[in-house]
Amino acid sequence: MAKTQWKSGDVARKSISDGWTYYARLLEFPWAVFYKHRTRQPDGDLNAITSKPVLFTLAVHKSFLAAGQWESIGNVPLDGSLAPPKAQAIRKFNLFKIIDL
């Protein structure tokens, strides 16, 4: 099976068991924006999808577009209004202890 390559601007969708299809758009790796847009039937109208407000931006794993995950449905070039976060905070917490019973 051919490997799906990450391409900034690609629009992806995923239908899940709750009966809804959800939509995202790839930024520079590893960032993706997720839209405030869900449909009962998969939508292929890229302009309608990308005109919706962005709910959130997440760093996603490289397997995001792997078979059985999110499906790339086309590309809408980025216009500069979408950008990955400028900073990301990572904190280590040593506040727990694993006990094997």
Image: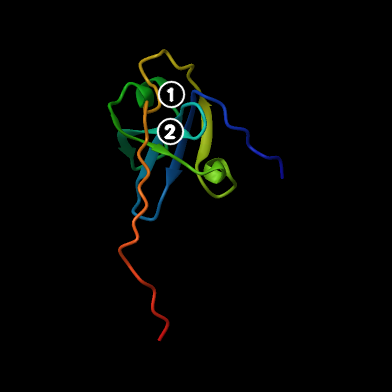
Say which quadrant the C terminus sits in. Answer: bottom left
On screen, residue 62 versus residue 1, left or right, reads left
Mark 2 and mark 1 lie on one chain; the one further toward the N terminus is 2
Q: Is residue 16 above or below residue 96?
A: above
Give the residue at x 34% y 54%: 18
Give the residue at x 67% y 40%: 3
Q: Out of 40 and 71, give the one closest to the viewer.
A: 71
Judged from the image, the secondary structure of the residue bearing numbered disc 2 is: strand
Residue corresponding to mark 1: 46
Kind of residue indicated by mark 1: Leu
Q: Position of residue 83 (x, y in %)?
A: 39, 22
Circle 1 crowding by C-alpha within 10 Å: few under 14, some 14–19, many from 20: some
Residue corresponding to mark 2: 32
Q: Is residue 8 above or below residue 20?
A: above
Give the residue at x 52% y 31%: 29
> What is the spatial separation of the Cα atoms under label 2 and label 1, in whole angstroms?
16 Å
Q: Position of residue 98 (x, y in %)?
A: 39, 73
Kind of residue indicated by mark 2: Ala
